[in-house]
Image (spheres, coloured by chain):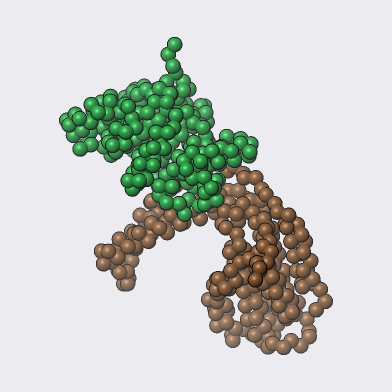
Amino acid sequence: MTLTPAVSIRDLSYTYPDGTFALDSVSLELKPGEVLGLVGPNGAGKSTLLLHLNGMLRANGGAVQVMGIPVKPKNYREVRRRVGLVFQNPDDQLFCPTLFEDVAFGPRNLGLQEAEVTARVRASLAAVGLQGLDNKSAHHLSFGQKRRAAIATVLAMQPDVLALDEPTSNLDPRGKRLITELIASFHHARIIVTHDLDLARTLCPRVAVMAQGRVIAEGNPQELFSDHDLLDQAGLR
Amino acid sequence: MSPGPILFLSPRTKILITLAVVVVCVSTPANRFPAFLGYLAFLFGFAALIRVELRRVLRHTLAVLPFLLMIAVFVPFLPEGQPAGSLSLGSSVHPFPSKLLVLWNSAIKAWTGAFALVILGASTPFPELLHGLEHLRFPRLLLALLAVTHRYGLVFAEEFSRTRRALAARAFRPRWLWQAGAIGRLIGSFFLRAYERGERVYLAMLGRGFTGVFPVAPHTSHAGDLPALILSAIILAGLRWGAA
């Protein structure tokens, strides 16, 4: 019996409305619980790829499936529950007056009972180490706390897949270590977009290297990152 | 000295009481001086009960001064006779010349209103205030707008102060008219950034199942709510319409 992949991307292509070419027949697969690193230079299409996982962008060609469900408009609701997308800038993700309301936003949209909403908020905040800060405004959190709060907002949706865009950018070494440990502690399938080769080495048994909208290499980070030609080509060195 | 009782009221109750004070005060004829004294006493009592820092509150009410100054400038040019802006003065002799009564009318009403609002603001964090308004069936879309404006207003204020520092670091000191161009470009870039951020925030909302309707949070009430509302209504009505 073969397990349904958590994420399956086949021949995905995307061109931005202004004609900018972003993805060129990208194919990737992610098993449940697996951690995949997505590395590459700025503009390689990594973040654009993430936006396809829950239908924020609609592909011009190819197909994406999440837990066997095709990412199509009629499935958006379900797919968005299953894929937790954590943006690079936590200020974009924390838009409510208080932390509690931010984390509760997703579960309330799912139409859950308030007792369940509260339970999920508490559990998610505890999972990222922000318990007790329910009534804080995002404005009063440190950058590292905001980043963890942004992760809590998607954990509350109880997703199958976590897609994290540059989770360690702009963090001090300690903040970086905390986030790395936090991501390692999860059991979801995880896609991590990063420039941070250390992070990719620590967290991802498998890494895909992207450049100019294509996956140019895939494999174990130890091997890939010792290939200097590849790193040069991908602008990672 | 032991601390006195702190009155816990739900934001909805505080909003209602504030609103009542403002409406009642504004509708009181300007020459009913004891009533205004009563309103102020009521507000001081209210402020003490819900424990707001009085000195800070009073300082914030000074915001009405420029407005009053504007009115004061025009007072000498008002025509003699019935003072404008005051209701049913009656024919009794009042201690103030009518022009001064106009000034008094605007001053006491503006200041009392500001006092009430500042007490509300000082005793209620902004998120609770929004929650209270929601409880009072304020349009949800406007509330969402207010919430987002408050949240991102602070983010933009931070960004703005960073940009200003960056400008100062390059010795830019806006002083002359021809420097307005730089300010204009700055405002333009802020507008674009706000627009882009709006797009990203919307995506973040969609990602968490947003369907165009903002979810409601449940409301809570405190035991003090109803008594406080009734008591305030009685006191205010007594001050406004009671024999004085």
* Left or right of residue B33, residue A122 in this image: left
**Can you give x and y, in whole percent of width and height, for residue A22 in the image?**
31, 33
Q: Colour of chain A?
A: green
Considering the image in quadrants, where does the N terminus of chain B appear?
Answer: bottom right
Eyeballing the image, is A12 above or below B23?
Answer: above
Tell whether B153 sits left or right of A204: right
The letter of the brown chain is B
Q: How many marks?
A: 0
Work out whether residue B12 or residue B225 is closer to the camera in this orientation and state it: B225
Q: Is residue B220 left or right of residue A73?
A: right
Measuring from the top left, give residue B182's x and y in whole percent.
31, 62
Measured as percent of width and height from the top left, residue A142 is found at 42, 51
Residue closest to the eye, A147 or B21: A147
Residue B202 appears in the figure: no
Vertical arrangement, residue A35 with respect to residue B130, above or below: above
Q: Residue A119: tell me if it is visible.
A: yes
Residue at 65 percent across and 64 percent down: it is B50
Tell me where residue B132 sits by quadrant: bottom right
For the point 40% across and 47% down, the residue is A144
Q: Position of residue A27 (x, y in %)?
A: 33, 23
Quadrant in which the C terminus of chain B appears: bottom right
Residue B70 is drawn in which quadrant?
Answer: bottom right
Which residue in the rendered view is the most extreme toward the left? A229
